[in-house]
Amino acid sequence: MPRLIVLPHADLCPEGAVIDNAETGKNICEVLLEHDIEIEHACELSCACTTCHCIVREGFDSLNEADELEEDMLDKAWGLEAQSRLSCQAVIGEEDLVVEIPRYTINHAREHH
């Protein structure tokens, strides 16, 4: 199984994380949540928001291709980059991944805690 390396995030995983058993075929969001990294997912993994936006720093090409709906949603994400994906839509392949969870989302309820 591939490894999923999460870069440090001040609130969600200050030390970063290494998940050695990221299951191929699951999406990044599912794997993060299963390992107690509470990434936002306001639409319950239905590709209807951008709160689970992540940036895939390594292994991007091993993921499934983003469809048109995901691309349209990503256009609304804060801090969009070329390797941005919605973690609820990014299905893990065979390669190790390095993922960064952006500091901010467009979810105002969460931002203003």
Image (cartoon, grey):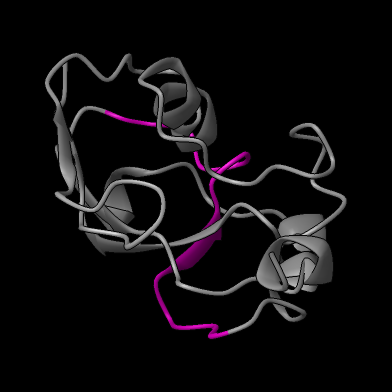
Classify residue 19 as left or right of residue 25. Answer: left
Q: Residue at x 40, y 56 (%)?
A: 11
- Assess whether residue 88 is covered by the magenta stretch: yes
Classify residue 41 as left or right of residue 94. Answer: right
Q: Quadrant of residue 57?
A: bottom left
Q: Is residue 35 above or below residue 75?
A: above
Percent of width and height locating residue 22: 27, 20
Q: Quadrant of residue 86?
A: bottom right
Q: Is residue 70 above or below residue 104?
A: above
Decide whether the magenta segment is chiefly helix, strand or loop: loop
Classify residue 59 as left or right of residue 41. Answer: left
Q: Quadrant of residue 105?
A: bottom right
Q: Residue at x 87, y 51 (%)?
A: 48
Q: Is residue 100 above or below residue 16?
A: below
Residue reaching furthest to the front: 113
> Could you tell me which quadrant the C terminus lies in?
bottom right
Percent of width and height locating residue 100: 32, 61
Residue nearest the viewer, comparing 39 with 112: 112
- Assess whether residue 90 is covered by the magenta stretch: yes
| Magenta segment | 79-93
> Could you tell me which quadrant the N terminus lies in?
top left
Percent of width and height locating residue 92: 37, 31
